Amino acid sequence: MAKQAKTAISPTRDENYPEWYQQVVRKADLAETSPVRGCMVIKPWGCALWENFQRVLDGMFKATGHKNAYFPLFIPKRFLEKEAEHVDGFAKECAVVTHHRLEAGPDGTLVPAGELEEPLIVRPTSETIIGDAFSRWIESYRDLPLLINQWANVVRWEMRTRLFLRTSEFLWQEGHTAHATSEEAMHETERMLDVYADFAENWMAMPVLTGEKTAGERFPGAVRTLCIESMMQDRKALQAGTTHFLGQNFAKAQDITYQSEQGRLEHCWTTSWGVSTRLVGAMVMTHGDDDGLCLPPRLAPAHVVILPMTGRADDPEAVRNYCHKLADDLRGIPYYGRRIEVEIDDRDIRGGEKNWQWVRRGVPIRLEVGQRDMAADSVFMARRDKSPKEKESVERTAFISRVHDLLEEIQQGLFDRAVAFRDAHSVEIDSEDAFREFFAAPQGEPTPVHGGFAWSHFCGDEDVEQRINDELGVTVRCIPLADGEAGTCIFTGKPSDKRVVWAKAY
RNA sequence: CGGGGCGUAGCUCAGCUUGGUAGAGCGCCUGUUUUGGGAACAGGAGGUCGCAGGUUCGAAUCCUGUCGCCCCGACCA
């Protein structure tokens, strides 16, 4: 039959990348759209995945001295009004609560009543409400640094949304810190960027560039914004995390002051930083293939799924027992801060369909276990990072002793593959013509995948940056933190300190 | 906020031009045969046709209004 060529996800990445992405999110059971415009329902499989992101990141924040706290969902309007740039940045996309009661209207409807004296804003981010607390918590240099994180949901009223990548409501963490000196705050900004890069590369197996945003891409109210940028499989860039050096902007607007050792009243230097459920989307687009999701083992909700093949077994119960014993043995093995997670799928549906469901969900290792395997004291293993056709019989105890290393091999393989992909589509470009050529969509393809990361010299002129964005839809993704050689701007011929990374972006 | 499009079963949609008992595929339930690569057959459940008016003996279909959603732009993690 022609089924051999059939992929689990349709369309494929080549055929229609954006649609492929939506299909993977749905077919992998990560999330679905909701009755509420722009908001998603995160399903159990997606939620389990996010919980792993949270658990690991939270541990990293604690390890760097941060404490969790929780601040209100609602922010008084006057708080947001305090920092001018901040207002400009977020005013256009805020959900505003104006009433606190519903009254019966005509025909069983409900109408808002009890208008609030001061409208409340559903937080788009919490700098202002946390800054207010900081202004009371911090009195002396002895209170510094103050290192706080919160896990929360935020709302930004987006025009166009895509599951995980951009939704009106999303889950994230936001770190907020206050320091005595500029240097210390800047150091914190860099340190947390390193944490994000570490998480992205070593847990998500997603290679990232670390860099600084240009003025145009900076967080509203920040002095400097640093970021990690990653390349998706359509060669577009995705900002996966940001850290902000806020200088004294918020401290001055919100009166966050401390008394120094010399007894003088000084303004604090603050930072903020965050990553969101967008990371889940980033992971889908970094590792997913035409058969669905492909999970890096260190974050996978399940490492191994056992599929008991009991259909034609003489003694189905014996096969099940064999599977459960195997699961128990595997669950005893430590793996990156937890145990090997095992699912046994004993649902009464056909083996083929069942198998493909787990392929789509991206579980690193699938084990088909039937009478034959039991008789041979072995398992029939398939790896998600290889073709669904490639399966091999492995002796049971050998598998158990190897599984940890196998997962590590898959983790490393995913990272290497992603690095190779990014490098294959990253080029140094030294003329504007070549630059335009690089980002020109090929003719005749419905959803042309093209371009990539262009490393080019740039003088930093904001008007030029804007013009390139208008004409090509290409922006400076970041000015890399790593050292680079000087040169001349490919657009203006003016001197340039180093190459910057240009790309189309999400 | 501009410019298009669409609301009919859980999902994807047909039916509407030319009014006459509500349809298909997928999914779901039951049974049988199957079961180590995406099952077949048989039976079954499931819809105030977005909502409100109007025209008509009769409206998913025609008219008016209204609400919602999607796509393309401008804006964004």
Image (cartoon, coloured by chain):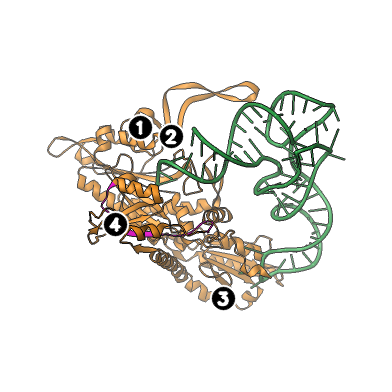
Chain colours: A orange, B green
Q: Chain for mark 2?
A: A
Question: Could you tell me which secondary element the residue under label 2 belongs to?
Answer: loop
- Tell me: A230 left or right of A378: left
**Residue B15 picture quarter:** top right
Give the labeled residue for mark 3: A392
Q: Which residue is mark 2?
A: A94
Bounds of the magenta segment:
A444-461
Q: Secondary structure at mark 3?
A: strand
| Amino acid type shown at disc 3 | Glu
* Circle 4 crowding by C-alpha within 10 Å: few under 14, some 14–19, many from 20: many
Same chain, labels 4 and 3: yes
Instruction: Tell if the residue under mark 1 belongs to the same chain as the one under mark 3.
Output: yes
Q: Chain letter of disc 3?
A: A
Circle nearer the N terminus (1, 3): 1
SS at badge 1: helix
Q: In terms of sequence position, does the residue under pointer 2 or pointer 1 come before the other?
A: 1
* Prevailing secondary structure of the magenta residues: loop
Front position among marks 1 and 3: 1
Which residue matches tag 4? A490
Residue A95's disc is none
Residue A259 vs residue A172, the one in the foreground: A172
Are tags 2 and 4 found on a single chain?
A: yes
Picture coordinates of residue A210, whole percent (x, y): 32, 56
> Which of the two discs, 4 and 3, labels the residue nearer the N terminus?
3
What is the chain identity of the residue bearing mark 4?
A
Residue type (three-letter) at the residue carrying disc 1:
Leu
**Would residue A452 be seen by someone viewing this image from the given angle?**
no
Report the residue at 47% width, 49% height from top. A165
Q: Amino acid at mark 2?
A: Cys
Find residue A80 and name its label: 1
The mark that comes first in sequence, 2 or 3, is 2
